[in-house]
Image (cartoon, grey):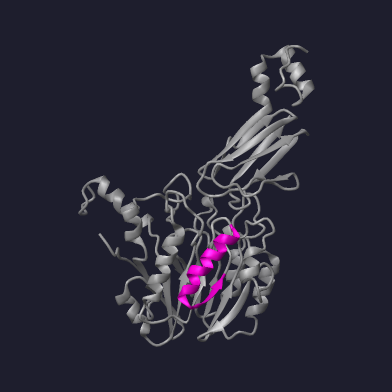
């Protein structure tokens, strides 16, 4: 347990413990906090694979507001320029999402 | 190379950019003999011709009050310039329509500022919402101000000068991967609204997002817009007025004329001409020089309408 630092602890103890044993700690952290950027009306990356318990943070880098909406799953407030929205995925599955203002903008989070 | 005057690509590119960056203040519409014609509003010499018999009305769009990004740090200021130009017109129009995106973020103060400026025109204004007007948490600010007497999410119709006007809402309940959306309830209302109307009565449909498919890759179209257009098929004169794409675009199909108005806030690129449809930054001087300088003429005895884009400066 001494190999776990405070940052790993509490995010997902099981994953962190397994990661601490099997993988370099940096890889485990990269999986825990994922970023999606909105640039030029595109979610980047459009598809993201993450492990259960990971948190994804979307950042709007456009001059136009956007939203991040997955029907029945999560819904951000309107994100103005540089605003962020985070969601922690506890259950495995495919989460399709889109911008409710510009519905041609779509993305996918695969939790597996 | 191609034999025209501008031998080098730089000039051609600049000309293309000019065409892409219209950010006019509005379009003046006049209806004579049931056929709407539009005139550039900013050129007072042209506006004077609006004194011709018939009814005149204005369209402004996409004022985006609250927008302060580099493409135009003062969208409220350019809206005020547009209203000042309207007030300076020698012929007072009957009323104005605003085809949505009044505000940028649906903040109460943005709506208040927009109203403070637009009301200086002392014209009746008929609004339809853009997607930027429904962003407040409870989606109530637009409805409180402009929803009175409307149906559903804010659609309505009225008659003026022998023309039947229909304001539609296509910015609600948008589906992932899709375009603008009218929805079954509104379409049923529209069909009912048109029932029994004389086919010789000119129809003006107005909504925020283009009702025809301009460029689906950027969401510039309405999923079920074709259904609405079926209902107006039998009418002799149909004019469809939209905003959303911040540039003049038009086409004529049979008896239907489609036209999009410029924004008073910032230009957007021509379809596919940039990585995204976001606000297009041009030199400040260039932006101002382009305000309100494009006019569109519906020639009464011609099916096709002519666009005349004439810069005021430079």
- In the image, residue B51 above or below residue B99: below
In this rendering, position of residue B154 left or right of residue B284: right
Residue at 60%, 77% in the rendered image: B157
Task: Give coordinates of residue A54: x percent, y percent.
Answer: 71, 30
Task: Give coordinates of residue B18: x percent, y percent.
Answer: 33, 55
- In the image, residue B117 above or below residue B161: above
Residue at 47%, 52% in the rendered image: B68
**Is residue B112 within the magenta segment?**
yes
In this rendering, position of residue B94 left or right of residue B8: right
In this rendering, position of residue A9 left or right of residue B258: right
Which span is picked out in magenta?
B106-127
Q: Which quadrant is the C terminus of chain B positioned in?
A: bottom left
Q: Nearer the viewer, residue B27 or B288?
A: B288
Residue at 36%, 50% in the rendered image: B282
Task: Give coordinates of residue B1: x percent, y percent.
Answer: 22, 47
Q: Quadrant of residue B232?
A: bottom right
């Amino acid at each position: 347990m001494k190999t776990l630092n405070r940052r790993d602890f509490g995010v997902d103890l099981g994953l962190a413990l397994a990661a601490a044993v099997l993988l370099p700690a940096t890889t485990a952290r990269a999986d825990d906090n994922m970023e999606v950027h909105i640039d030029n009306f595109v979610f980047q990356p459009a598809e993201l694979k993450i492990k259960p318990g990971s948190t994804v943070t979307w950042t709007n880098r456009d001059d136009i507001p956007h939203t991040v909406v997955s029907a029945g799953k999560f819904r951000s407030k309107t994100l103005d320029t540089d605003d962020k929205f985070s969601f922690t995925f506890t259950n495995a599955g495919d989460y399709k999402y889109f911008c409710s203002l510009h519905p041609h903008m779509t993305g996918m989070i695969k939790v597996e | 190379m191609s034999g025209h005057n501008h031998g080098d690509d730089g000039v051609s590119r600049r000309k293309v950019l000019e065409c892409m960056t219209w950010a006019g203040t509005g379009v003046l519409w006049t209806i004579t003999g049931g056929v709407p014609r539009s005139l550039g509003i900013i050129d007072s010499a042209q506006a004077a011709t609006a004194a011709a018999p018939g009814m005149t009305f204005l369209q402004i769009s996409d004022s985006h009050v609250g927008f302060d990004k580099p493409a135009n740090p003062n969208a409220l200021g350019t809206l005020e310039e547009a209203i000042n130009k309207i007030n300076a017109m020698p012929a007072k129009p009957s009323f104005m329509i605003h085809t949505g995106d009044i505000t940028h973020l649906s903040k109460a103060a943005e709506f208040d500022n927009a109203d403070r400026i637009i009301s200086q025109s002392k014209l009746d204004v008929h609004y339809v919402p853009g997607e930027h007007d429904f962003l407040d948490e409870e989606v109530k600010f637009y409805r409180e101000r402009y929803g009175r007497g409307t149906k559903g999410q804010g659609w309505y119709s009225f008659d003026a000068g022998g023309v039947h006007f229909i304001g539609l809402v296509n910015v609600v309940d948008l589906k992932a991967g899709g375009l603008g959306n009218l929805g079954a309830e509104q379409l049923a209302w529209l069909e009912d609204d048109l029932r029994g109307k004389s086919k010789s009565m000119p129809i003006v449909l107005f909504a925020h997002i283009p009702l025809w498919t301009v460029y689906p890759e950027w969401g510039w179209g309405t999923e079920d817009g074709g259904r609405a257009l079926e209902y107006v098929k039998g009418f002799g004169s149909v004019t469809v007025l939209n905003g959303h794409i911040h540039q003049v675009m038009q086409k004529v199909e049979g008896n239907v004329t489609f036209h999009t108005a410029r924004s008073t806030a910032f230009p957007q690129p021509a379809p596919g001409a940039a990585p995204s449809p976001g606000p297009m930054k041009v030199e400040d001087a260039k932006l101002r020089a382009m305000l309100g300088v494009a006019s569109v003429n519906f020639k009464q005895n011609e099916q096709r309408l002519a666009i005349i884009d004439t810069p005021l400066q430079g």
